Image (cartoon, rainbow, N blue to C red):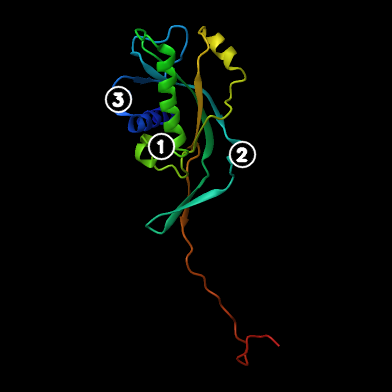
Amino acid sequence: MIHDLDRTIEQLLRAELPASVLSQVGISFVTPDAQFPPSSVTLPAIDLFLYDVRENRDLRSNEWQIDRREDGTAAKRRAPVRVDCSYLISVWPSESSNTPAQDEHRLLGEVMSVLLRHPVIPASVLQGTMQGQEAPLPGSSLQPGRLQSVAEFWQALGGKPKAALNYTVTIGVQPHAEVDTGPLVTDSEVRMELGANGSNGQG
């Protein structure tokens, strides 16, 4: 499921970034440590590092949802668990660039513009299990991230601090199987007993 979210965000960037940018950069999801880039990544590159996954308890729901089938039966299932997936997005310019800082900031600005244009990820770019989710996939950028200290984060990875964007997407995860409830009750019948005198027994 998380892999499908990665693919969805990549597709959003490929659909929205200028063609002149896409022709030059790669998109990766590897850890931006001191050994970045690995041999599988060619610079310049946009890196989306998934650093935090946790339940969004503000959106927790204990309600059951009823799915009605064409054969007249139904099944019920619990509402999906809402999960926040937080990415740290960084940009890595070409090693041969004469203006690496300017290139990095220019590309980071392009990515920021795409994310701000889409507070909800468009259905047209959803991949795999991200398709058909019962609620839209909201994405928030330029909001406080889950990292307590960005400087300590870069230090822990053995790299130098650099500009980065925090991007969080809320997805729905269904860990529970649906429960068959049998045929639906669509009609009700009311019976009244008549007394010997033809009345319903009421005074």
- 55 to the left or right of 33: right
- Three-letter amino acid code at the position of disc 1: Met
Choose the circle earlier in sequence order: 3 or 2: 3
Say whether residue 174 is visible. Answer: no
For mark 2, give the secondary structure: helix
Q: Nearer the viewer, mark 1 or mark 3?
A: 3
Residue occupied by mark 3: 20
Q: CA distance from mark 2 to mark 1?
A: 21 Å
Residue occupied by mark 2: 58
Residue occupied by mark 1: 130
Q: CA distance from mark 3 to mark 2?
A: 41 Å
x then y, percent, for residue 9:
40, 30
Q: Residue at x 42, y 27 (%)?
A: 111
- Three-letter amino acid code at the position of disc 3: Ser
Choose the circle earlier in sequence order: 2 or 1: 2
Choose the circle earlier in sequence order: 1 or 3: 3
Residue density around tag 2, few if under 14, some if 14–19, many if 20 or more, within 10 Å: few
Placement of 21 over or under 187, stated as above or below? above
Q: Quadrant of the C terminus?
A: bottom right
- 195 to the left or right of 68: right
- Quadrant hosting residue 110: top left
Residue density around tag 1, few if under 14, some if 14–19, many if 20 or more, within 10 Å: many
Q: Nearer the viewer, mark 3 or mark 2?
A: 3
Q: Quadrant of the N terminus?
A: top left
x then y, percent, for residue 153:
56, 14
Placement of 175 over or under 164, stated as above or below? below
Q: CA distance from mark 1 to mark 3?
A: 28 Å
